[in-house]
Amino acid sequence: MTDDVKRRSMRACIGAARKWHNDEQSSPEDGRGPAANQLSDILRQPMKATRKMALLSIATSIGTLALKFGAYFLTDSVSLLSDALEALVNLAAGVVALTALTIAEQPADDRHTYGHDKAEYFSIGVEGTLILFAAASIIYAGWSRFLHPLLPGNLGWGIGVGLLAAGMNFATARLMLKVAAEHDSVTIEADAKHLLTDVWTSAGVLGGLLVIVFMPAWNILDPLMAMAVGLHIVVTGVDLLRRSIDGLMDVALSQQEISKTEELIHAALPAGASFHALRTRKAGATRFIEFHLTLPGETSVRDSHALCDRLEESIAGHLAKTSVTIHVEPQDAHAPPA
């Protein structure tokens, strides 16, 4: 049994033991049931890096939201309003991400025997939907201002505040992408890319406003930039929804990971053995791999088990957080009767 499998088994056992202990210890006097005790246990656990990043995203979004709405009220610029609305979506997405990560970190239980990793896919699906709603609002506001042009004011202050907000988002997104890569978290990666999208749209908005500072007659750029921002983030929203659907539909691992898995299996197989029916999927950061292993009919159960252990260790040693299921069958299992 691999160390990774042992750790997952131990976590599951500890979680079950804790739940049993809470069920036994809870009483009407304390007013808390098993569910409340289990939530309390989760909150007392050391905070993981992914949850810290979700909290950082929320804190950054609150700061940039205040700055961007401040810039909008200073200038009455519809493109800065579109930037502020996107910051509002960032905040909502951060809250959803934190909730999903908290759920995903819970150990497997009787009702969710494969764990709760797929909660991350619900998170990015909700985030993609929120982005599309924000895009529709931004495009509508831009079109209204296009029909009724207005020259924004106090653009110097507005641009300065916008640059500060963009800098905060950029620094946070870079750190989140690093942690997402280290922990293979699709939720943190999606949240970070959303923040980076906000940075690039802010750059476009501020660039357009800078042109208006020197050429006021070009004030039509304000609503045009707002609509461009809306169309740009539609692409981000659609991509997140696609990834959410792929994850919930058990999309296979990448071709690179599948090829690596096949290579590792071939390298560990003894003479006379083969495999087929390889299937893969991914739930959050956890990979699931299963295949049929065909061995000579005279192979003992002990030898078959030892070979399966070697295969599991080899695969788990190269692909992090991988659960491997192997079905062993004799070579003559499908042979026609004599």
Image: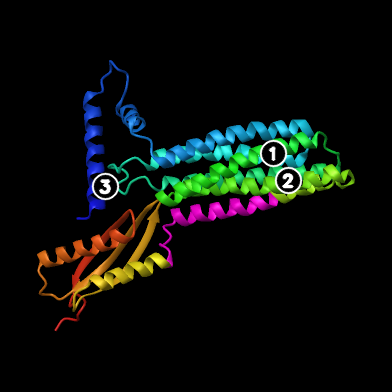
Q: Is residue 140 magenta?
A: no
Say the numbered circle drawn on residue 240. none
Which callout, 1 or 2, points to the residue nearer the camera? 1
Left or right for 111, reference 92: left
Say the numbered circle drawn on residue 8. 3
Q: Residues within 10 Å of mark 1 (few under 14, many from 20)?
A: many
Labels 2 and 3: the sequence-earlier one: 3
Above or below 207: residue 265: below
Secondary-structure class at tag 1? helix
Residue drawn 65% across and 43% down?
A: 134
Above or below 272: residue 77: above
Amino acid type, label 3: Arg
Amino acid type, label 1: Gly
Residue 163: % across, % down: 68, 40
Which callout, 1 or 3, points to the residue nearer the camera? 1
Relative depth, front residue between 157 and 62: 157
Residue drawn 78% across and 34% down?
A: 75
Left or right for 276, reference 51: left
Secondary-structure class at tag 3? helix
Relative depth, front residue between 222 and 12: 222
Relative depth, front residue between 274 and 154: 154
Which callout, 2 or 3, points to the residue nearer the camera? 2
Say the numbered circle drawn on residue 162. 1
Image quadrant containing the N terminus: bottom left
Amino acid type, label 2: Val
Residue 99: % across, % down: 45, 37
Give the Cα distance between marks 1 and 3.
46 Å
Residue drawn 44% across and 37% down?
A: 52
